Image: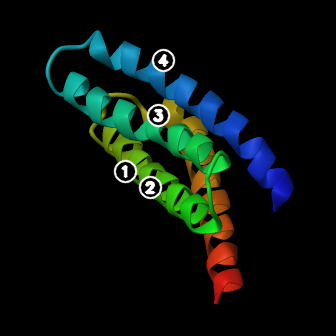
Amino acid sequence: MDEKRNDLPERSFQFALRVVKLCQFLNEKPGVPRTLANQLLRSGTSIGANIEEGQGSQSEADFLSKYSIACKEARETHYWLQLIAASGIIPEDRLKELLVECNDLIAILTTICKKLKEKRK
């Protein structure tokens, strides 16, 4: 679990960077893509920000809180990515790697949070 925690800040940063680039592309389009880009940008970059905050947490409870928020943000990000694909704004095959990485982040964060909750019982 510690190895995943140490790798997670970098993975979430690289994910956020890819989200930023995708949002820059979406912002070049008028209307709905811009609105979705704003939502995606907020949630997609929040994952890594909360993980970083968790890394500097003052307590186990604080750590769990930040990682739980990161997990929720990852789920929201996955939603926006699916919506962008389903609406045809960007074909799903072009978003596949981002969707897979988002699912991986959700799985890792869920596992870490579950283990910490079990440990605290």
| Residue at image location 61% in from the left, 40% down from the top | 52
Specify which label sits upstream in the sequence, 4 or 1: 4
Confirm or deny contact between disc 4 and disc 2 (CB under 8 A): no
Residue 42 drawn at (x, y percent) = 35, 35
Q: Quadrant of the N terminus?
A: bottom right
- Alpha carbon distance from label 3 to label 1: 14 Å
> Dot 1 corresponds to which residue?
79
Name the amino acid type tagged 1. Tyr
Specify which label sits upstream in the sequence, 3 or 2: 3
> Dot 2 corresponds to which residue?
75
Q: Which mark is residue 21?
A: 4
Residue 79 drawn at (x, y percent) = 37, 50
Specify the quadrant of the image occupied by residue 34: top left
Specify the quadrant of the image occupied by residue 13: top right
How many neighbours does mark 2 have within 10 angstroms: few (below 14), some (14-19), or many (20 or more)?
A: some
Find numbered disc 4 in the image and state the secondary structure of the residue it sits on.
helix
Find numbered disc 1 in the image and state the secondary structure of the residue it sits on.
helix
- Depth check, mark 1 against mark 2: the one in front is 2
Residue 51 drawn at (x, y percent) = 59, 46
Find numbered disc 3 in the image and state the secondary structure of the residue it sits on.
helix
How many neighbours does mark 3 have within 10 angstroms: few (below 14), some (14-19), or many (20 or more)?
A: many
Confirm or deny contact between disc 1 and disc 2 (CB under 8 A): yes
- Depth check, mark 3 against mark 2: the one in front is 3
> Dot 3 corresponds to which residue?
45
Residue 115 drawn at (x, y percent) = 70, 76
Specify which label sits upstream in the sequence, 4 or 2: 4
How many neighbours does mark 1 have within 10 angstroms: few (below 14), some (14-19), or many (20 or more)?
A: some
